Image (cartoon, grey):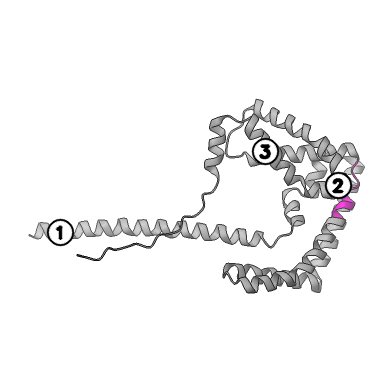
Amino acid sequence: MKLFGRVSVLSLMALGTVAYAADTKKTEAVTKTESKTEAKTEAKTETKSEMAEKEDSLMAVAEDAGLSGDAQTKFKDAAEARQKKLDAWSESEKGKQLADLKKELTAARKAKDEAKVKTLEEQAAPLEKEHAELMDSSRGEVLGLLSDKEWTKAISASLDRRVKKSLSAVTLTKDQEEKIKEISDEAVPGYLKEHTDKEQAFKGLVGLQSKVSAKVKSDVLTDAQREAIKAAKPAKPEKSAEPTTKPAK
């Protein structure tokens, strides 16, 4: 009986450990899901202009364009002067007001307070518009320093890099990388012909990237690579089902 008692206790302890481990894994999974949700919520408060600049800074554009010497210095000075303008706006009364509204928006979205979200979005809209216009116009002035040849080179390099980055879930062969560059380079002239304004072309590059990525997946990747990319996409969190217990007969 004593032996049986000891075995029972050990069994219960083992079951408790397994249950604790399972609960810990569930908690970690929920925490990760919540973190991703919060990141998406914060991303919603960014303007298209801010998101475009995250993808490629002006100095990255200068590097892609192959600038050197006086041209590089002139471009760098213009980019720094622009940043001072943006910093000054952020430190202004309007800039601080927008920053506060964005924080409130993040909290309201997290709390799923739709009425408050709508009110805050309406309050932030004119400030976001003013900030975005300043970002766009000042960036357009800096990009205007590039010649057509330099601009084409910069866009081609950026597009090639973005497309390959979107395929980071798979390992590309050297031949595939060369084919991707060819497809990217072929797409640029037509795109720039339709988007003569450098600033608009810069912001709209994400649309071209999507088209080129789709073509690459179809014409360059293998079936196994396409499946690997699908599998790498974050799965939507499943809704936890409430446990149902049947009444005892």
What's the residue type where badge 3 is placed? Answer: Ser
Name which residue lies at 72% across and 52% down.
54
* Spot occupied by residue 162 in the image (x, y as percentages of width and height): 70, 41
Which residue appears at 78% of the width and 50% of the height? Answer: 203
Callout 2, which amino acid? Answer: Lys
Is disc 3 surrounded by few (<14), some (14 to 19) or many (20+) residues within 10 Å? Answer: many
Q: Which residue is mark 3?
A: 213
Work out which quarter of the rendered image holds the C terminus and state it.
bottom left
Kindly identify the amino acid type of the residue bearing the numbered disc 1: Arg
* Residue bearing mark 2: 198
Give the structural element (helix, strand or loop) at label 2: helix
Pointer 2 local density, CA inside 10 Å: few below 14, some 14–19, many at least 20: many
Q: Is residue 196 visible?
A: yes
Do the residues under discs 1 and 3 have CB atoms within 8 angstroms?
no
User: Residue at image x 25%, y 66%?
Assistant: 247
**135 or 77, which is in the foreground?**
135
In the displayed orientation, state which residue is furthest to the front: 249
Q: Is residue 109 magenta?
A: no
Numbered disc total: 3
- Bounds of the magenta segment: 138-147
Is 143 contained in the magenta span? yes
Number of the label disc, if any, that sits on residue 179: none
Q: Is residue 67 visible?
A: no
Tell me the distance, in whole angstroms, between the alpha carbons under discs 1 and 3.
Answer: 62 Å
Q: Which residue is mark 1?
A: 6
